[in-house]
Amino acid sequence: MGRLRAITIKEIWALIRDPRSRITLFIPPLIQLLIFSYAATLEVDNIDVGLLDMSAGVHSSEFASRLAGSPNFRTIKRLQSPGELRAAIDRQEVIAAIVIEADFDRRVESGQPATIGVVLDGRRSNAAQIVASYLQDIATSVGADIGPLSRAPPGGSVVTNWFNPSLDFVWFNLPGLLVLIVSVTGLSVTAQSVSRERELGTFDQLMVSPLRTHEILIGKMIPPLIVGLINGIIYLLAARLIFGVPFTGSVALFFFALTVYMLALIGVGMLVSSISQTQQQAFLGSFLATVPVVMLSGFSSPVENMPGWLQIANLVNPAQYFLVISHGLFLKAMPVGAVLAQLWPIVIIGCVTLATSAWLFRARME
């Protein structure tokens, strides 16, 4: 235990003494959390839309006023003709244009179906689809209010949002960002450990020291694990105190899952570090490992939307399992059984990566 404690303290001091490591351990991840929590969002606000109202009646004016009162729309550009509508979208002055036909009010008052046309800028497809849903909500609201004027009573539905009642995107975004930033930090710190020794010329000293191979390996694994847990504490406090994101699950269960996840990442990082001769190679290797871990985690797009072969390949990605755990513990008090169901694949991945990295590390030392 004394030798293990010595190598662990030595690795921690190596991180603290290195100016680059000292700066990049905590400050950039915290800045990324603050910036990405607001910047990385699928919400669309401050939208410019066009309105071609050829009816100019009471009901079309009501729709226009609801449109202007929506917090999502910045300006409503009044259009006078279809040609002006086309020009506004071509020049990207508006992302969408609403077309109200001349017989809109007459059809509403006579009880006939009345529709509102929407022309979207397909060059910004994702934002355009979100804008279309905003417009659909406004049209549904107006239709419900003027429904009694029609011959048939309007239908309707009552929507209840569980786990995120106000549909605040930060509530969804921040638990995922926590996983991504911890992943990037954990991989980068671990990948630099052995390559830094080689670059400084101290790796040969480790080889002739009385330390056993597994003691060196464990000593190099503990510092990035500590860094990951400290970052987890910081992000958890920031989520609750700065962003107001609730944490409804077990804190102890969260950090247990985070520890298991970090060990799986450390195994990957040690693999990269063992085959790298310089810190630059280790940085590039950790980057190549980080990109698929992050992109295929399910944060930016659901795993279910990926091709079948990619879903199968993604089974070895620990981030997709921990992302489910993070969202579940933050928003819906995920029970122990559900957490363990997502945790056991991470355990298997961690065992494989740690065993492989230990074998490769031992082979390199010999």
Image (cartoon, grey):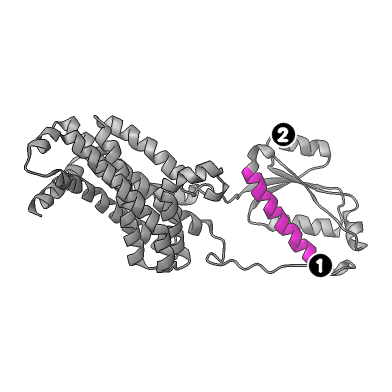
What is the x, y in percent for residue 339?
A: 41, 63
Q: Earlier in the sequence, mark 2 or mark 1?
A: 2
At a point 62% along the width and 68% down the height, the residue shown is 160
- Any magenta on residue 99? no
Front in this rendered view, residue 335 or 101: 335
Q: Nearer the viewer, mark 2 or mark 1?
A: 1
Residue pointed to by mark 2: 90
Q: CA distance from mark 2 to mark 1?
A: 37 Å
Q: Is residue 190 shown to the viewer in this render?
A: no
Report the magenta residues as a range: 126-147
Q: Give the vertical position of 292 relative to 235 (above or below).
A: above
Q: Which residue is mark 1?
A: 154
Disc 2 marks which amino acid?
A: Asp
Quarter of the N terminus within the rendering: bottom left
- Please, is residue 37 above or below residue 148 in the view? above
Element under label 2? Answer: helix
Query: Is residue 142 highlighted in magenta?
Result: yes
User: At x 11% / y 38%, what residue is drawn?
Assistant: 206
User: Does 213 sit left or right of 37 as displayed?
Assistant: left
| Residue in the image at 36% along x and 62% along y | 254
Where residue 175 sits in the image (x, y, percent)? 44, 56
Q: Is residue 278 visible?
A: yes
